[in-house]
Amino acid sequence: MFGLKKKTSANSNIFGLQQNQHANWRLPGQANKTLEDLIGEDTRQENIGGRRFLGLTIAPGRFQAAGIIGLCVFFLLFARAAHLQILQGDYYQDLSVNNRIRTTTIVPNRGKITDRHGVSLAENVPSFVLNMTIADLPKDKPERDSVIAKIVDLAGLQPADVDLLITQYAKTSNEPVSVKKGISYETAMRLAIETADLPGFTLETDRLRLYNSSASSLSHILGYVGKISPEELTEFADQSYRLVDEIGKTGLERSAEEYLRGRPGKYEVEVDALGRELSVIAREEPVPGANLILSLDVNLQRMIEEELYGIFNQTQTSRASVVVMDPQSGGLRALVSLPSFDSNSFATGIDSETYQNLLANPDKPLFSRSISGEYPSGSIFKPFVAYAALAEGIITEKTSFLSTGGIAIGPWFFPDWRAGGHGITDVRKALADSVNTFFYIVGGGYQNVTGLGVKRITDYARTFGFGAITGIILPSEADGFLPSKEWKEEVKGERWYVGDTYNLSIGQGDLLVTPLQMAAAMAVIANGGHKVAPRLIEAVDGQVDARDLLRVVASDEEFDPYLIKVVQEGMRRGVTLGSSRYLSLLDMNVAGKTGTAQNIGDRPTHAWWVGFGPYEDPEIVVVILIEEGGEGSEVAVPLAYKIFDWWDNNR
């Protein structure tokens, strides 16, 4: 094979060489050297048979070194195998099983929400969702990019969005992540056909939350569901939420999430290398969420909303709140806050531009004025000051003061709204005609009359529920504000003056209330002295135990029913003789009080009206606030008429 020129005999040994047999062999190009010269003297080896062979001599030490190295390599391989199989065997076995067997959550049907007559307010409709399981994507980057590019094109996605999901959820790669929700039937069929063999992506049936859009103000009550955030996953880590799950974000959807969600089920499936389901191993059925029946009447809610839009068209305002409540049970019949938003736009995935427009809107449509708005009350606070003065013995029902147009304290003058005054005024007339002078005197004192003072006014206000949340199930309820001497000295660095008490006595100054607080307080007047908590949920239907949702906040406050009756009579005169006279045209007898609350700076006043009816056996309390609407008698009273008239004909 080397091109040797020496011939061998037919019977010679082709492997063995005789003594000096190779001495004169020559290699091509090496004419002056023998093969032995090239190989070296140490190639001549004699075996026991006296034969010589061609080869290199390996010293005995080299054999030993090679043996030691071989043993070391063997030992290392053995040790690694032992580590993997013995010490980490369970881990890798679990990993193998997890790659082959997957546990999938069965999402329960979310509970429905209806009004008191069964009209659907929130329900589930069939839909489709495209999910991605990162662990099932191709490991080869070019192949992965090709799969993602095809999905992006078919589903109308942005590549950067998919890449972001892969980065965000890399640590939970075995869990599916929603890539696109709310997919139409036509798009779903196309995706199902064209992505059947694309690893990492699955098209699944889904349920889309659909909200009643007949009254946009329902959105503040119902809220909406949305994709769970990483922070929420951490917060509710013990409740089996997944990356693809939706959770209540605001409103009832948020506060009743535990009951509306139900209890998830699960099933274990065996999957192939592409993550496709091969067989179901085990299954646990889910428990559907509880259905909530609210105390609301959606038709009343819609009617009020339509009337408010009519007011907006005639005035410079576009913000309002209306609360209609049953004074006996606390059930809310309407809870309107405008402007509002569409819950459906959030449930289907609101785009960034629309969301930013909502945030930038100066009228704050995402803000629920009925439960979170805090406003000076104006004269609608007077019935509660009247009760406090009667209860503390500052006055009796027959006590009268002369109103001549206001009270002067040093250089300061505190006016009546009527320049010439109201003449001789008792408590009923003071409420009917909203006489400031009367409340200045009973609140802050004057001449020989010792008034209630700031502490007693605020103490009684607290018994009616001001200065604290009502405890309604909705999130983000504000507690209003009751000022005090200590607060003013600490925050403003000023002492408390009698003029501050005068302002507080007529619902001005630093006093702040919410429309819902006012409704709860007025319910005490309407029902004869019983404190009730506003509530939205009238009944619960479902397998989930939701009795906590029906729990009524107990109250041990006691009110004198006779003194309450005196206040009722004063408010009734407000309709028959006072600033709410337009309501006397109703077929139903009602009682009420107007209010015009001063605003910040030179901005227009807030228009208020509060009252109840029927007067003889009240069924509803009504609270109306038109922000910067002007006079309560001009703007709020006509709306009150519409509400009572509707109730009289539709209840």
Image (cartoon, rainbow, N blue to C red):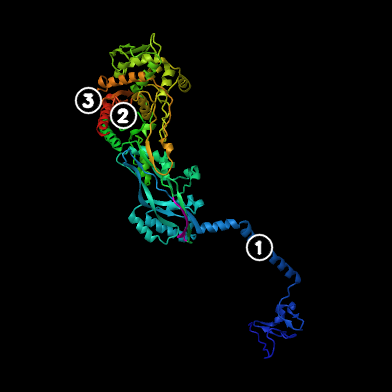
Number of on-image labels: 3
In the rendered structure, which amino acid carries the disc numbered 1?
Phe
Q: Residues within 10 Å of mark 2 (few under 14, many from 20)?
A: many
In the rendered structure, which amino acid carries the disc numbered 3?
Leu
Q: Tell me whether circle 1 and circle 3 mark residues in contact (CB < 8 Å).
A: no
Residue 34 seen by the camera: no
Reply yes or no: does residue 282 show up in magenta. yes
Distance in Å between CA atoms under marks 1 and 3 = 100 Å
Which residues lie in the magenta part?
274-285
Q: Quadrant of residue 115?
A: top left
Residue 12 seen by the camera: yes
- Discs 3/2, front: 2
In the rendered image, the quadrant that contains the C terminus is: top left
Q: Position of residue 87 (x, y in %)?
A: 63, 56
Relative horizontal placement of residue 313, taking residue 62 as reference (left or right): left
**Along the line of sight, the residue nearer the viewer: 263 or 459:** 263
Distance in Å between CA atoms under marks 3 and 2 = 19 Å
Q: Is residue 127 above or below residue 355?
A: below
Distance in Å between CA atoms under marks 1 and 2 = 86 Å
Residue carrying label 2: 619
Q: Earlier in the sequence, mark 3 or mark 2?
A: 3
Residue carrying label 1: 78
Looking at this rendering, what residue extends furthest in the bottom direction? 10
Residue carrying label 3: 585
Q: Residues within 10 Å of mark 1 (few under 14, many from 20)?
A: few
Looking at this rendering, what residue extends furthest in the top direction? 448
Q: Position of residue 589 (x, y in %)?
A: 26, 25
In the rendered image, the quadrant that contains the N terminus is: bottom right
Q: Position of residue 480 (x, y in %)?
A: 41, 27
In the rendered structure, which amino acid carries the disc numbered 2?
Glu
Relative horizontal placement of residue 404, taking residue 251 as reference (left or right): left
Q: Secondary structure at mark 1?
A: helix
